[in-house]
Image: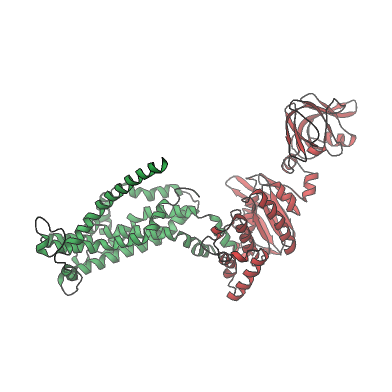
Amino acid sequence: MKSRGSRGWGIVRVAFLAVLTLFTLLPMVWMLLTSLKTQFAASQYPPEWWPKNVTFEQYSLLLSPATETGRDFLRYMFNSVWVSLASTVLGVIVAVPAAYAFSRFRFPGRQLLFYSVLLRNMFPAVVFLMPLFILMRWLHLVNTEFSLILTYLTFGLPLSIWLLKGFYDNIPAQLEQAARMDGATRFQAFFQIVMPLSSPGIIATAIYSFILAWNEYLYALVFLNDKSKLTLPVGLQRFFTEYTTNWPGLMAASFITSVPVVVLFLILQKYFVRALTEGAVKA
Amino acid sequence: MAEIRLHDVVKTYGSMYAVDHVSLTVADGEFVALVGPSGCGKTTTLNLIAGLIEQTAGDIFIGERLVNDLDPKDRDIAMVFQNYALYPNKTVFKNLAFPLKMRKMARADIDVKVRAAAKVLDIEHLLERRPRELSGGQQQRVALGRALVRDPRAFLMDEPLSNLDAKLRGQMRAELKRFHQDLNATVVYVTHDQLEAVTMADRMAVMNGGLLQQYDTPARVFDAPVNTFVAGFVGSPAMNLVPAIVVNQGGSFILRGSAGWNFPLSSRNARKAVAASGPGVILGARHSTIALHRTATPDTMPGRIYTVEPTGDITFAHVRVGEANLVVSVTPDVRLAMDDDVWLGFDQNRLHLFDGVTGGAL
């Protein structure tokens, strides 16, 4: 009886997951297929389901520094990598000590501070667009990458701190005390004992910050005008307006843009899942 | 190894005294148990000695050195934690090597030291394992190994046996005692289990409410508790404590209970009783010093059997006397049933009298 019942559920589960996978994967697949077609094949109706003449022409165009399109695209990509990496690294540098302090130390205003950190996430990002723009203009950062790096930092930090605090809460304080008795300073105890144990959390928050920064469009659009400073999402949008008829080119650009995120996530997803569920059940 | 000296040490949290003017000296090579109920300040005291928290006032000496301002790492003492606190991402070998590595010992010397410690504790075969692959008893040994691998000046132990099952705990108790004697180690051992304190310690410091109640050998603490708290805490089952008033009956003194019983005092006990700050005193008697009679006997306390607990070689009878509940031990051949009437006789030479107001021994 029991095995029959669970087999029935198994089928439902597999079917459900299959539909869900199809739903998420189809756009990606279609994007990839279109990017490999010729321009003529891409505009046919009814659509050519499978590209007859596979061509990597669009990819070589986008990734070659010889053409203007290629130079633009590579520049956007470089900008995106730089902005995302910088906000990720800075994010980890700020989030790790902040989360550690929230977890370990008792100081006046601790609760208030912790919740005010989370407050940022309760509002839609667009609410902060004008205030932040004015702030950036006042700081003379408009039209520089730093405006975005700073902004993305404030976007990523609340959840990063929150996730990491869960990690530190789960690392017994006695481990650090033991290390200090064994001859370590507070910093050595942190770097040699606590840091390695919290590395899954650090990796997870780093991926999260990176993806957040990599995908962000609205602020990048508003804060930057200089074409040479644009990031990929905004640059991609420019391509859409400039080359409306070149579907394979657009799809190739879109595909290249989404690859880093997917690869990052696939490699590190086990840390991500662990970070999100850590602390859910007290050991 | 070194002596540890606490001089008038205070630790407050806000207005709460976690450790209230505690002074005590642990002699070089002595095993001292800090014992008391949870929240009594024993673990705080241990952490103060370790340097993990800072005292509000007072001085702590390790050997001749005043360590008030020294970090834990500079106090050169080792600690064994209740949950062992083994580094989960390091192998047993690396756990044992960590304190030596922190002292910048040469790699070859570390290897020799770690293997020697592992041999002493019979964990050589576990060196490449990680802590989570070990049983509770093995983890306990590794924690001990990490403490002794670097010849510290003293060992601090925070309830190291409380996570083990009863059988293993008995075995480790014996091993710890042996370990202390073989190494001639100075040990400060925190426990809430008075049995551990009594069986292992050279001296025990009984604490309550941040105050050091009594600091003496287990035998002395058992035989001459300084107040009702110590009397009620040490010994299993605890000492029976019955409130009474002292009455002068034509020159001879008797104790009278609220249940109506009268108990004449010997002249020695009468002298003690009249020294109390008021007429109220508390009569204390260990279960083994009380005689249980089946028939009315002069100078006894009438009671009624509440329940009977046979444990095999000894039977504990819980006896209700008015409001009080006394535990009396009898040999297993004595047949007792619930609600039997019994009469309790006290040994004048082995009973204790405490002040009814202060609780102090008279």
Hey, which quadrant is residue A94 in on the image? bottom left
Identify the residue shown where x is 54% and y is 55%. A173
Nearer-the-camera pick, A205 or A10: A10
User: Tell me, what hue is chain B?
Assistant: red
User: Disc count in the image?
Assistant: 0
Is residue A49 visible in this depiction of the protein?
A: yes
Identify the residue shown where x is 77% and y is 39%. B314
Identify the residue shown where x is 77% and y is 49%. B218
Is residue A141 visible in this depiction of the protein?
A: no
* Chain (green): A
Of the 4 image quadrants, the one containing the N terminus of chain B is bottom right
Scheme by which the image is coloured: by chain
Using the image, determine if residue A131 lies above or below residue A243. Answer: above
Nearer-the-camera pick, A191 or B248: A191
Nearer-the-camera pick, B256 or B175: B175
Q: Position of residue B183 (x, y in %)?
A: 72, 64
> Left of B319 or right of it: where is B126?
left
Using the image, determine if residue B360 lies above or below residue A278. Answer: above
Nearer-the-camera pick, A207 or A92: A207
Of the 4 image quadrants, the one containing the C terminus of chain B is top right
Q: Position of residue B98 (x, y in %)?
A: 57, 67
Q: Position of residue B233 (x, y in %)?
A: 71, 42
Hey, which quadrant is residue A31 in on the image? bottom left
Q: Position of residue B356 (x, y in %)?
A: 76, 34
Instruction: Farthest residue to the top: give it.
Output: B260
> Left of A208 or right of it: where is B25?
right
